[in-house]
Amino acid sequence: MPVTKEVKVVIVVPAFNESSVIYNVLKSIPKKIKGTSLVDVVVVNDGSSDNTQSEVRRAGIPVINHVINRGLGAAIRTGIEYARKKKAAIMVTFDGDGQHDPSDIEKIIRPVFQKKADLVIGSRFKKSKNVPLDRFFLNWFANVVTFLFYGVVTTDSQSGLRAFSKKALNLIDFKGERMDFSSEILLEAKKNKLKIAEVPIRAIYTEYSRKKGQKNLNAIPTFSRFLVRLLR
């Protein structure tokens, strides 16, 4: 990927009570990415009650604070607004719990550079063999619901590692503020006839990241919310 003038990438890291890991996560994110002119990292602190904000500042990264915990979808929407204001060519979402491999960032933005996709999903399930069984079935359920009600085929509808083109940033307008927003993004991409691609990524499952991730029992209310919104 040759360096293109003024190709700005904004990496949005949503965080809620991640003080024990967020510093190391931020330090692991590359400051330069092949093919880009500028990498701008921002944390959306979603009403954390611990020392997340101070740890982010210690890492030297700008932070946008939500006064209360509004949910992951709301944090990503704030990140999209930031990326638009910064006139980003590409926006990446990157979870703050240490689940993602920073080296996969370059991999997921490549299809956007090549004009092959407007929305790229980093799939933890496309080739991975180390996925915990409960996570596999929870994701399978989410993918089935996403296909049945949204008509979008995906292997990882709930992935937190994504890349958006500038076109996608301008057109995608989701309403969900909790975990249901992940499937809604795919619906928005389909409605706006955006090109969707998936690339395999490595998931780093630790005891901490599993506790912080989507809880199995949360699946029912999560999908109930976006089904109600779909049927309105």
Image (tube, grey):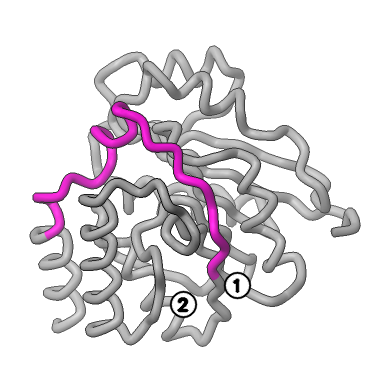
Whether residue 145 is situated above or below residue 206 in the rendered picture: below
Residue under label 1: 118
Query: Which of the two labelled residues, at mark 2 and mark 1, occupies the earlier sequence position?
Result: 1
Indicate whether residue 48 is drawn in magenta: no
Please rate how many residues cluster around mark 2, counting C-alpha atoms within 10 Å: few if below 14, some from 14 to 19, many from 20. Answer: many
Report the magenta residues as a range.
198-219
Q: Which quarter of the rendered picture does the N terminus lie within? A: bottom right
Q: Nearer the viewer, residue 198 or 164?
A: 198
Identity of the residue drawn at 65% across and 42% down: 103
Q: Secondary structure at mark 1?
A: loop
Q: Quadrant of residue 44?
A: top left
Q: How many marks?
A: 2
Residue 157 image position (x, y, % from top left): 36, 65
Relative vertical location of residue 65 with respect to residue 157 in this rendering, above or below: above
State the residue lying farthest toward the front.
129
Q: Is residue 80 left or right of residue 17?
A: right
Residue type, label 2: Ala
Callout 2 secondary element: helix
| Residue at 58% across, 56% down | 84
Q: In the rendered image, which residue does mark 2 sit on?
A: 189
Q: Residue at x 31, y 31 (%)?
A: 16
Where, quadrant-wise, is the C terminus in this rendering?
bottom left
Q: State the residue at coordinates (54%, 52%).
A: 201
CB-based contact (under 8 Å), mark 2 and mark 1 = yes
Q: Which mark is residue 231?
A: none
> Is residue 201 a member of the stretch shown in magenta?
yes
Query: Mark 1 is on which residue type?
Result: Asp
